[in-house]
Amino acid sequence: MRISRYLATALLTVSASSVFASGARPMQPSGSQMSPQDVAVTSFNDGVHARDRAWKLEKELETTQDPARQDKLRQKILKTYEADARSQRDAIKSKPDMFQAWTELGYALRKGGDYPAALEAYDKSLSIMPNYAEALEYRAEAYLGLNRVTEARDTYLLLYNGGDATRSQQLAEAMQKWVSSRRSEPAGVTPESIDQLNTWLSQRTEIAAHSGSGKVGSWR
């Protein structure tokens, strides 16, 4: 799921908050004058800029018909997510409790196909900021990549019952894509398991339609 740049939290300073909210590159002192937090924020935003470039390349890939160009775009996308991951590791090195960077690292790793490493990054983010919705939703997509459907379903219910209609819907869409993908390429998943999730999604869609945005929870 594509989610805009993270908003700052109370863990970051006011100056850092403006960086997260706007996405602009901060005016930083040079060299040793930069604090660890300044370095972390700069590295984080460098990674986000790389991710944004990857998104643009992905959009181009969707409309490209030439096979040779498609291959080049896929290579560029992979390298760009690798750049994102490097920047997030730099951010974490300077500020180990920066849960946003751990979440973005997980995203970059997942997009690169390393689902186990992505799960580790998401788990670390959630150990710092429990019930961080973006990490929960992203982690559930990594579960899907590993065909761990039960964990993905549990996460959907956590998000939905917690009142996060937007991210629960994003996860439902990801699960529907998983159903479509596994029907064409099962990857070891039985047809019965695929049908079960599809039926469950249909039921949840009906429930969500009748209950509006869901009940307001206090888990976040």
Image: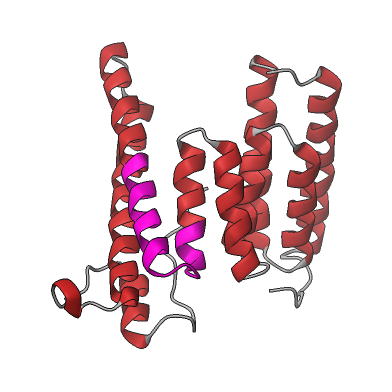
Judging depth in this view, the residue of 200 and 90 nearest the camera is 90
Q: Is residue 98 magenta?
A: yes
Q: Residue 148 appears at what percent x and percent y? A: 74, 37
Q: Is residue 208 above or below residue 188?
A: below
Q: Nearer the viewer, residue 100 or 176?
A: 100
Q: Going 48% across and 81% down the picture, which residue do you hit?
A: 11
**For residue 217, side relative to residue 92 (left or right):** right
As drawn, the residue found furthest toward the top would be 67
* Main secondary structure of the magenta stretch: helix
Tell me: residue 11, above or below residue 177.
Answer: below
Query: Residue 164 at what x, y percent from top left?
Result: 67, 65
Residue 125 is situated, as x and y percent measured from the top left of the image, at 57, 62
Q: Which residues are magenta?
A: 82-102
62 sits left or right of 206 in the view:
left
Residue that extends furthest to the bottom in the rendered view of this protein: 14
Residue at the left extreme of this rendering? 30
Between residue 125 and residue 2, name the one nearer to us: 125
What is the quadrant of the C terminus in the image?
Answer: bottom right
Position of 210 compared to 35: left or right? right
Coordinates of residue 215 in the picture (x, y in percent): 79, 71
Hey, which residue is sitting farthest front in the picture?
Answer: 32
Q: Quadrant of residue 61?
A: top left
Displayed quadrant of residue 93: bottom left
In this rendering, does residue 2 appear at all? no
Q: Is residue 125 magenta?
A: no
Asked if one can make out residue 63 in the rendered structure from this viewpoint, the answer is yes
In front: 2, or 169? 2
Q: Residue at x 76, y 75 (%)?
A: 216
Residue 88 lies in what quarter of the image? bottom left
